[in-house]
Image (cartoon, rainbow, N blue to C red):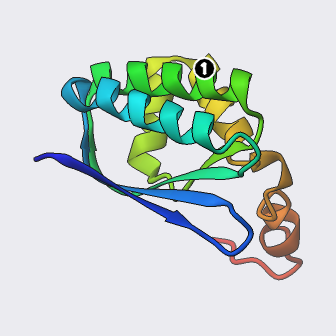
Amino acid sequence: MSMKANVLRDANGNIIVHMQGDLNYDHSYPLRNELQQIANNNPNAKITIDLGGIDFVGSSGICHFVETLKIMKDKQSNINISNVKPEFLKIFKLYSLNEADFVAELMNFDSDETENLNTKFGNRDNTFEN
C-alpha cells in the first residue's frame, strides 16, 4: 500500500499533517522532504503529525521517520505527533528506548492524566478476596 499525507491548516496558522497508509523505507525520504519543506515555508507554525491513519510501520521506515522528527525538532520546536497506535509505540520501543523517549516527549506523556489511576481506582477498601 502507498502512503498519503493530507495537509490542513487551522485558523491560527497551525498545520496538521494527517498520514494514511504504510510508513516504510520507500516512503520515508519523500515524507522527510515534504515535512522539511512545510517546516521551512512555515517557520512559526505549530506542526502536528497525525499518525492515526498509519496501518503499517516497517523497521527501516521507523528509523528514517524518527531521524526526520529529530532533524525537524532541532530546527523547529513547535512540532509534535498525535494519535500514535499502541503497536506503533511498540515498534519505537523495539527500535530503541531513546526513540521511545523522544516520541513520549513529543506526545507530552509527562502531562498524562492517567498517571494516578491506580490510586484513584485500584486501591479500594472493598476488594474481592479468595
Reply above or below: 59 against 118.
above
Q: Residue at x 71, y 39 (%)?
A: 43
Which is more toward the observer, 70 or 107? 70
Reply above or below: 94 against 9.
above
Three-letter code, disc 1? Ile
Is residue 83 found left or right of 104 in the rendered image? left
Is residue 2 found left or right of 46 in the rendered image? left
Residue 101, quarter of picture: top right
Which is more toward the observer, 48 or 126? 48
Which is more toward the observer, 97 or 18? 18
Residue 90, quarter of picture: top left
**Residue found farthest to the bottom:** 126
Q: Residue at x 50, y 24 (%)?
A: 68
Reply above or below: 16 against 67.
below
Q: Residue at x 69, y 77 (%)?
A: 128
Query: At which x and y percent is residue 64?
Result: 40, 20
Query: At which x and y percent is residue 93?
Result: 51, 27
Question: Mark 1 packing: few (<14 Cα in 10 Å), some, or many (20+)?
Answer: few
Query: At which x and y percent is residue 67?
Result: 51, 19
Query: At which x and y percent is residue 111?
Result: 85, 54
Is residue 65 found left or right of 48 in the rendered image? left
Residue indicated by mark 1: 71
Is residue 39 found left or right of 95 in the rendered image? right
Residue 105, quarter of picture: top right
Reply above or below: 2 against 125.
above
Q: Residue at x 62, y 28 (%)?
A: 72
